[in-house]
């Protein structure tokens, strides 16, 4: 029986056909572009559910938790396939650690190896699925800005970037954008956040801080670890982060 690609196209000496290989290349290129957008998307004002005392209530947090989750998935997926290739062929030059673009370039250079590997179809499925996840998170309408929830109906408020006011369509009420943003910023005080989430939040307050800087603060004992999230990432009190970031800003 003639072997076939997952799409049904006959293949000879490979797992993926030429067409699916091209799709995989495009997916990897798009992944590399989307991961560069994630820090910006992560810092977008959004909403998520939080649990207190056994009850779930919705509060505003100026960080996109979906982007944070997909970002973790992206790092894990891309680095895993790089590791698979390196374990199979140790002579390959490994990409720089913690450099997602380098990891994507590595996969792109070795797409031919994925094409003929027995796990080629699995790599295709995971990487193209990752591309779709990143696309859903990153491809947002650029002409709209999230300005928080309506204080009456709790609906989402969207307006044009730079606008001083925004209208709630269901209620017909108008809100001051600066006041809504200030209200949301207050919601993060007392929150526990990871280093990546904290860096994204600080950017919303015009306190650009790298995740590595937060890690350094913790390593040097300037920042106390308050707990860990479900993935084992260290959590810090946002109040402590903003205090350190403010102190680091030149007078």
Image (tube, grey):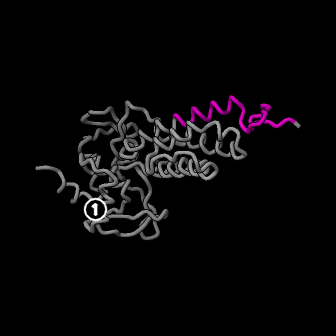
Q: Give whichever of 161, 71 is nearer the camera.
A: 71
Residue at the front extreme of this rendering: 91
Residues drawn in magenta: 2-29
Is 11 magenta? The answer is yes
Q: Is residue 184 visible?
A: no
Q: Give whichever of 116, 41 is nearer the camera.
A: 116
Disc 1, SS:
helix
Q: Is residue 167 visible?
A: yes
Residue at the right extreme of this rendering: 1
User: Residue 141 placed where, x, y %?
Assistant: 43, 32
User: Residue 45 placed where, x, y %?
Assistant: 36, 45
Q: Looking at the image, which residue is at 51% across and 41% down?
A: 104
The correct choice, above or below, for 196 with respect to 141 in the image is: below
Q: Is residue 13 left or right of residue 120?
A: right
Q: Looking at the image, which residue is at 37% across and 50% down?
A: 63
The correct choice, above or below, for 16 with respect to 98 in the image is: above
User: Residue 12 placed where, x, y %?
Assistant: 79, 33
Occupied quadrant, residue 145: top left
Q: Is residue 11 left or right of residue 233?
A: right
Is 15 magenta? The answer is yes
Mark 1 neighbour density, 10 Å: few (under 14) some (14–19) many (20 or more): some
**Residue corresponding to mark 1:** 217
From the image, which quarter does the N terminus lie in? top right
Q: Give whichever of 148, 153 is nearer the camera.
A: 148
Q: Looking at the image, which residue is at 37% across and 64% down?
A: 235
Q: Is residue 200 left or right of residue 3?
A: left
Q: Looking at the image, which residue is at 37% across and 30% down?
A: 143
Q: Give whichever of 108, 217 is nearer the camera.
A: 108
In this figure, what is the number of numbered marks? 1
Q: Is residue 220 left or right of residue 228?
A: left
User: Residue 44 placed where, x, y %?
Assistant: 37, 44
């Amino acid at each position: 029986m003639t072997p076939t690609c997952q799409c049904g196209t006959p293949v000879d000496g490979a797992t993926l056909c030429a067409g699916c290989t091209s799709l995989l290349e495009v997916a990897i290129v798009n992944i590399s572009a989307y991961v560069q957008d994630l820090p910006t998307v992560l810092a977008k004002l959004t909403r998520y559910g939080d649990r207190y005392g056994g009850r779930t209530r919705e509060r505003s947090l100026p960080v996109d938790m979906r982007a944070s989750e997909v970002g973790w998935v992206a790092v894990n997926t891309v680095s895993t396939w790089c590791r698979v290739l390196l374990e199979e062929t140790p002579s390959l030059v490994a990409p720089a650690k913690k450099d997602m673009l380098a990891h994507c370039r590595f996969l792109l250079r070795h797409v031919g190896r994925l094409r003929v590997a027995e796990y080629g179809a699995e790599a295709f499925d995971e990487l193209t699925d990752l591309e779709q996840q990143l696309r859903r998170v990153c491809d947002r309408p650029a002409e709209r800005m999230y300005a928080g929830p309506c204080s009456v109906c709790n609906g989402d408020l969207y307006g044009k970037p730079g606008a001083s006011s925004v209208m709630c369509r269901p209620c017909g009420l108008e809100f001051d954008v600066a006041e809504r943003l200030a209200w949301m910023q207050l919601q993060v005080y007392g929150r526990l956040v990871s280093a990546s989430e904290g860096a994204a939040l600080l950017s919303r307050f015009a306190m650009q801080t790298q995740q590595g800087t937060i890690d350094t603060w913790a390593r040097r004992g300037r920042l106390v670890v308050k707990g860990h999230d479900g993935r084992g990432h260290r959590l810090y009190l946002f109040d402590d982060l903003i205090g350190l970031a403010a102190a680091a800003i030149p007078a």
